[in-house]
Image: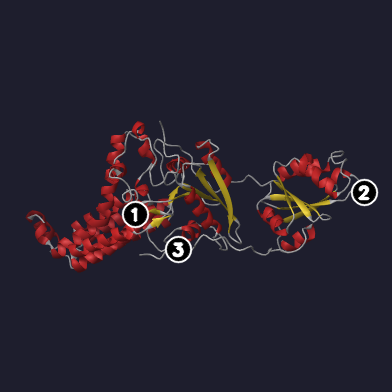
C-alpha cells in the first residue's frame, strides 16, 4: 500500500507580516527595490494648489495603460471632482465612493496586502499621511483566446477549452451552470508565485464534507510556487505515492460541469489550462462526455469496449509470456505450430522479446511527444513500420510478439485518461515479469495484488473502487451500461449530497 498523505487539514498558525512597516509609497518602493518595472507618479488631486499630492504605483506590463489613464488618472485630476475633500481622509473616502472610475476598489492598510495587489495587476493610490492606500483593478487583458480542445476531442460537445487565465475559466463554467448554487471559493497558494486557486461546487449537489476537506488541504499547501499540476496533486491527494491517478483532469468546461452536476468538487488554477475534479474513482476514468450525447445502446457498447481494452492492455502481454514459457498445452495445435515455426530462428525468449518490444514502444511514444509534430509523426512511422518490419525479417523478434505488443498498445490508447494509461503501462511491465518467473500463477497473483491495492485506495473520503464497492447490486450494471436519459433520475449515491435527484 502507498503511504497516505500526512496532511491533516489543520490551518496554519497566524504568520507574521512579510513586509513590516507603514504603508507608504516610499516603503512600497523599498519592497520592490531592484524591480525596473515598478512605475510611480505623483498626482495633484483636482489639480488644486495646496491640496496634498498622492502617489500612484503600478507594475508595467501587468496594468493596462489605457484603463489606468481613463479610469484612474483622468477622474483623479479632473478639476472640481474632488472639491469637497478637505483633507486626505475625505479625499480617500471620496475616491472610494466613486470619484475614481475603477470598477473594483479595495482599501489596504498593510504592505503585504498592497504588494500582493501590485503583483496581481492593480494600481495603488497611496495616502502617506494616513498610512493607507486604495487598490484599483486595471490589469491587462492580454491572454490566450479560448480555442478548441487539443487533447479531448469534442464530437457533439462544446468546442471551447480552458485557457491559462483563471477568471476566463470560471466564466466558462458559469456559462454552463447559470445558478447561484454554483459556489466559488478562492485561495492563494505559493509564497513566491502567489497563484490563485478556485474551488467550485454546487451547493446541495456536492457533499459538504468533500468541499470542506478539499478547501482545508488547498489552504494547507505551503510551497514556493504552484506552477504545474503536480505541485497541486501531490499535496492534496490521499496517497501521493500511488501511481494511480486520484484527481480527474479535463480541459473541457462542459465535462467539468457534468462532473459538478454528479456531485464532485472542481479546482481551477491560474496558469493551468486544465480543471481538476474530486473525488475520483476508477469508473469515472473510463467515461467520456460523448457518452451522454449518444444513444444509450451505442454508449453502452463503447463503454464495454473500453473496459475490455483495459483488460487487454493490462493482461495480454503477460498472458502471452506465461503461456509461451510454461503452459503451451493451453494453445491449439495449429497456433502452437505456427508460433514455434516463427520463433525457430529467434535467439531470444518470449519474455525478453515482449519486454524489449514494450520498452521500444515506450521510447517511440516518448520520441513522438517530445519532437515537433511533423518530425514526431515521421519518427513514429519509421519506428513502427521500418524498424519493426526489419526486426521481424532479421529474426530478432517473432511476428506474434509484435502483434501482441501492438494490440496491447492500441488498447491502452483507448483509455480516456492518459494518467490511467501510464499506470497501466507500469503495471503491465510488472505482470510480464511475474509471468516470466511463475507463469500464469504469477500473473494471477499479480492481478490479485493490483485489485487488493486498488480496493484499499481512497479519494477524499470515497473508495477508489466505488461504485463497485459499498453500493447496491446494480452498481456494476450502472458502470458498464448507460441508461436512457429519461430513466437516469438520480445522481451517483457515493457522490451526491442532499439534492440527489436529477429530474422528476
Q: Name the quadrant containing residue 303.
A: top left
Residue most toward the right? 50
Q: How much space separates mark 3 and mark 1, taking CA atoms?
A: 39 Å
Q: Nearer the viewer, residue 43 or 51?
A: 51
- N-terminal of the pair, mark 2 or mark 3, is 3
Residue that numbered label 1 is attached to: 380
Can residue 105 be spotted in the picture?
A: yes
In this image, 96 relative to 388: left or right?
right
Nearer to us: label 3 or label 1: 3
Name which residue lies at 25% across and 60% down: 448
Nearer to us: label 2 or label 1: 2
Nearer to us: label 2 or label 3: 3
**Rendered-image quadrant of the N terminus:** bottom left
Q: How much space separates mark 2 and mark 1, taking CA atoms?
A: 75 Å
**What crowding class fits label 3: few (fewer than 14 Cα within 10 Å), some (14-19), or many (20 or more)?**
some
In this image, 410 relative to 72: left or right?
left
Residue 117, given in percent of the width and then of the height, sits at 68, 53
Q: Nearer the viewer, residue 53 or 504?
A: 504
In this image, 349 relative to 369: left or right?
left
Q: Secondary structure at mark 3?
A: loop
Q: Nearer the viewer, residue 255 or 4?
A: 4
Q: By what rule are the colours in the image chosen? A: secondary structure
Residue that numbered label 2 is attached to: 50
Q: How much space separates mark 2 and mark 3, taking CA atoms?
A: 62 Å
Residue that numbered label 3 is attached to: 5
**Rendered-image quadrant of the C terminus:** top left
Q: Name the quadrant containing residue 152.
A: top left
Amino acid at each position: 500500500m502507498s503511504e497516505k498523505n500526512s496532511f491533516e487539514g489543520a490551518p496554519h498558525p497566524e504568520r507574521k507580516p512579510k513586509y513590516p512597516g507603514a504603508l507608504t509609497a516610499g516603503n512600497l518602493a523599498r519592497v520592490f527595490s531592484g524591480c525596473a518595472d515598478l512605475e510611480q507618479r505623483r498626482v495633484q488631486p483636482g489639480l488644486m494648489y495646496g491640496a496634498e499630492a498622492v502617489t500612484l504605483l503600478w507594475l508595467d506590463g501587468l496594468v493596462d495603460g489605457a484603463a489606468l489613464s481613463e479610469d484612474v488618472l483622468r477622474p483623479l485630476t479632473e478639476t472640481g471632482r474632488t472639491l469637497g475633500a478637505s483633507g486626505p481622509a475625505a479625499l480617500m473616502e471620496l475616491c472610494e465612493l466613486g470619484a475614481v472610475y475603477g470598477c473594483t476598489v479595495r482599501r489596504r492598510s498593510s504592505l503585504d496586502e498592497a504588494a500582493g495587489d501590485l503583483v496581481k495587476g492593480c494600481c495603488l493610490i497611496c495616502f502617506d499621511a494616513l498610512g493607507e492606500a486604495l487598490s484599483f483593478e486595471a490589469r491587462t487583458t492580454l491572454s490566450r483566446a479560448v480555442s478548441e480542445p487539443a487533447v479531448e476531442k469534442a464530437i457533439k460537445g462544446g468546442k471551447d477549452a480552458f485557457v491559462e487565465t483563471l477568471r476566463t475559466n470560471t466564466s466558462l463554467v458559469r456559462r454552463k451552470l447559470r445558478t447561484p448554487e454554483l459556489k466559488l471559493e478562492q485561495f492563494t497558494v505559493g509564497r513566491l508565485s502567489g497563484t490563485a486557486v478556485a474551488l467550485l461546487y454546487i451547493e446541495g449537489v456536492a457533499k459538504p464534507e468533500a468541499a470542506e476537506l478539499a478547501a482545508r488541504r488547498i489552504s494547507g499547501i505551503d510551497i514556493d510556487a504552484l506552477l504545474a499540476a503536480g505541485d497541486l496533486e501531490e499535496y492534496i491527494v490521499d496517497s501521493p505515492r500511488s501511481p494511480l491517478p486520484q484527481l480527474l483532469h479535463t480541459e473541457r468546461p462542459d465535462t467539468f460541469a457534468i462532473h459538478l452536476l454528479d456531485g464532485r468538487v472542481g479546482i481551477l488554477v491560474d496558469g493551468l489550462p486544465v480543471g481538476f475534479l474530486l473525488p475520483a474513482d476508477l469508473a469515472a476514468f473510463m467515461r467520456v462526455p460523448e457518452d451522454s450525447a449518444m444513444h444509450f445502446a451505442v454508449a453502452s457498447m463503447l463503454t464495454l469496449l473500453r473496459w475490455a481494452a483495459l483488460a487487454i492492455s493490462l493482461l495480454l502481454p503477460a498472458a502471452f509470456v506465461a503461456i509461451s514459457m510454461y503452459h503451451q498445452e493451453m494453445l491449439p495445435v495449429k497456433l502452437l505450430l505456427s508460433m514455434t515455426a516463427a520463433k525457430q530462428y529467434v535467439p531470444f525468449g518470449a519474455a525478453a522479446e515482449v519486454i524489449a518490444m514494450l520498452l521500444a514502444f515506450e521510447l517511440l511514444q516518448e520520441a513522438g511527444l517530445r519532437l515537433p509534430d511533423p518530425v514526431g509523426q515521421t519518427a513514429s512511422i519509421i519506428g513502427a513500420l521500418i524498424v519493426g518490419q526489419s526486426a521481424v525479417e532479421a529474426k530478432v523478434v517473432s511476428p506474434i510478439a509484435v502483434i501482441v505488443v501492438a494490440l496491447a498498445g492500441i488498447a491502452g490508447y483507448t483509455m480516456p485518461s492518459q494518467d490511467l494509461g501510464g499506470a497501466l503501462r507500469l503495471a503491465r511491465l510488472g505482470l510480464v515479469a511475474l509471468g516470466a518467473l511463475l507463469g500464469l500463477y504469477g500473473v494471477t497473483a499479480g492481478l490479485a495484488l493490483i485489485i487488493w491495492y486498488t480496493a484499499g485506495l481512497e479519494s477524499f473520503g470515497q473508495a477508489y473502487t466505488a461504485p463497485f464497492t459499498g453500493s447496491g447490486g446494480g452498481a456494476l450494471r450502472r458502470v458498464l451500461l448507460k441508461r436512457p436519459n429519461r430513466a437516469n433520475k438520480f445522481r451517483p449515491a457515493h457522490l451526491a449530497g442532499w439534492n440527489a435527484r436529477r429530474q422528476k
